[in-house]
């Protein structure tokens, strides 16, 4: 597909009573995140500092590829965030499209007056998963996406030797900033929000037993935006089984799914077992593992091998968008109409 002929509509799935496309355009490249390291991040940030570049890509997505939903972070004072929302407005007007939004927010967790420390949070994950699943240190140290975090390769090993997990008394004092969450989500009322996603801090609340707090957060987010709430998890193998037996009112899970097992914690096998056993819909992220898995392989694995219900796709150019949407559509078609083999073959 190299011309501008409009494609057919993207198939949909129902999540929390809302129809959601099986392919959702991600926005992290527009915010300067590549999952390929700082140099590529700088390249993306420079490219999408030109609002027209972002606008053109979004117009192509909406007009030609029939993309009807995009994942976002809530508007912020960050320059690239402001430029993205400006481009989204321009592209929507130009194409006459009002895309649905899947909005991910970070949970503003704190203990007393202090925000939860990111590295102590990850040390707590490590401690819990090591006690349940054996030595997971190598996975934490060598995961290709974790290694793209700034200085992860230096800071996390240092934290392992000098940082203690959060203690039970601290977990008991855990709370969240309700006012800040309200201020973060309220601007999204200006958009057509399909789903709102509580970020991967969900893992911390689930794994430390603070489902009461998670329930309050989900209720607040749902009330502010009047839409279903899904939750992000990087620790699907640990978190999903906990949430499956809970009454938190979540509508689904947003979690990494890729053939490399990148950011599928604590181990790929355990994460896959939890994903496949889920009674709630799965929205896959990082299917290409930050560009490390070819699109054809990535989407066949995501949709056919694992059986995810939907997938978020990040594209940093019109060429990438073209290829990714094409391969995602082919994978979805293959899932719905698998080739006849063996005893099912017509003779």
Image: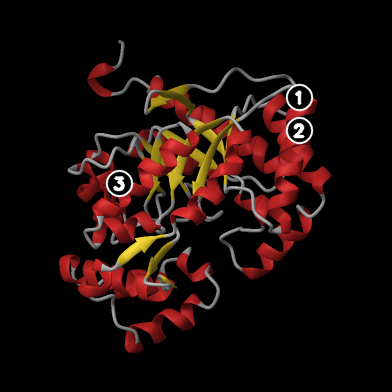
Residue placed most toward the observer, 245 or 112: 112
Distance from disc 2 to disc 3, alpha carbons, whole Å, reads 36 Å
Residue 252 lies in quadrant: top left
Distance from disc 1 to disc 2, alpha carbons, whole Å, reads 6 Å
Q: In this view, does 247 lie above or below 121?
A: above
Q: Residue at x 36, y 76 (%)?
A: 120
Rendering colour mode: secondary structure
Circle 2 residues within 10 Å: few <14, some 14–19, many ≥20: many
Q: Is residue 301 visible?
A: no
Mark earlier in primary sequence (3, 1): 1
Q: Which residue is drawn at 46% across and 27% down?
A: 332
Q: Report which residue position mark 1 lands on.
A: 95
Mark earlier in primary sequence (2, 3): 2
Q: Is residue 277 above or below residue 180?
A: above
Q: In which quarter of the image is the C terminus?
A: top left
Q: Where is residue 211 in the image (x, y as percent from the top left)?
A: 25, 52
Q: Which numbered dot is residue 330?
A: none
Distance from disc 3 to disc 1, alpha carbons, whole Å, reads 38 Å
Q: Are marks 1 and 2 in contact (CB under 8 Å)?
A: yes
Q: Report which residue position mark 2 lands on.
A: 91
Q: In this view, does 21 lie above or below 184?
A: above
Q: Where is residue 172 in the image (x, y as percent from the top left)?
A: 24, 67
Residue 303 lies in quadrant: top left
Q: How many labels sit on residues?
A: 3
Kindly state the secondary structure of the residue where label 1 is placed: helix
Q: Report which residue position mark 3 lands on.
A: 215
Q: Quadrant of the N terminus?
A: top right
């Amino acid at each position: 597909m190299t011309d501008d002929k409009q494609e057919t509509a993207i198939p949909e799935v129902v999540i929390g009573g809302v129809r959601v496309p099986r392919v959702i355009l991600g926005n992290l490249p527009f915010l300067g995140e590549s999952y390929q390291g700082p140099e590529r991040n700088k390249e993306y940030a420079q490219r999408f500092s030109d609002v027209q570049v972002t606008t053109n890509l979004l117009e192509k997505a909406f007009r030609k590829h029939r993309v009807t939903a995009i994942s976002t972070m809530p508007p912020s004072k960050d320059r690239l965030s402001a430029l993205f929302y400006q481009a989204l407005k321009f592209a929507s007007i130009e194409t006459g499209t009002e895309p649905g939004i899947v909005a991910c927010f970070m949970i503003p967790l704190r203990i007393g007056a202090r925000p939860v420390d990111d590295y102590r949070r990850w040390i707590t994950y490590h401690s819990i998963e090591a006690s349940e699943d054996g030595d997971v240190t190598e996975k934490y140290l060598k995961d290709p996406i974790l290694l793209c975090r700034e200085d992860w390769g230096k800071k996390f090993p240092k934290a392992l030797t000098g940082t203690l997990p959060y203690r039970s008394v601290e977990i008991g004092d855990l709370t969240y900033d309700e006012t800040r969450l309200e201020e973060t989500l309220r601007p999204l009322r200006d958009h057509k929000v399909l789903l709102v996603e509580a970020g991967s801090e969900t893992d911390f609340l689930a794994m430390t037993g603070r489902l009461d707090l998670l329930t309050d957060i989900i209720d607040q987010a749902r009330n502010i935006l009047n839409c279903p709430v899904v939750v992000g998890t990087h620790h699907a193998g640990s978190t999903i089984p906990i949430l499956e037996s809970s009454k938190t009112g979540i509508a689904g899970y947003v979690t990494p799914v890729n053939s490399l097992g990148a950011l599928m914690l604590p181990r790929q096998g355990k994460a896959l077992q939890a994903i496949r056993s889920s009674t709630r819909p799965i929205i896959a992220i990082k299917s290409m593992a930050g560009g490390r898995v070819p699109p054809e392989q990535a989407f066949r694995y995501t949709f056919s091998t694992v059986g995810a219900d939907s997938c978020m796709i990040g594209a940093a150019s019109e060429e990438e968008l073209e290829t990714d949407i094409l391969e995602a559509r082919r994978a979805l078609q293959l899932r719905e109409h698998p080739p006849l083999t063996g005893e099912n073959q017509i003779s």
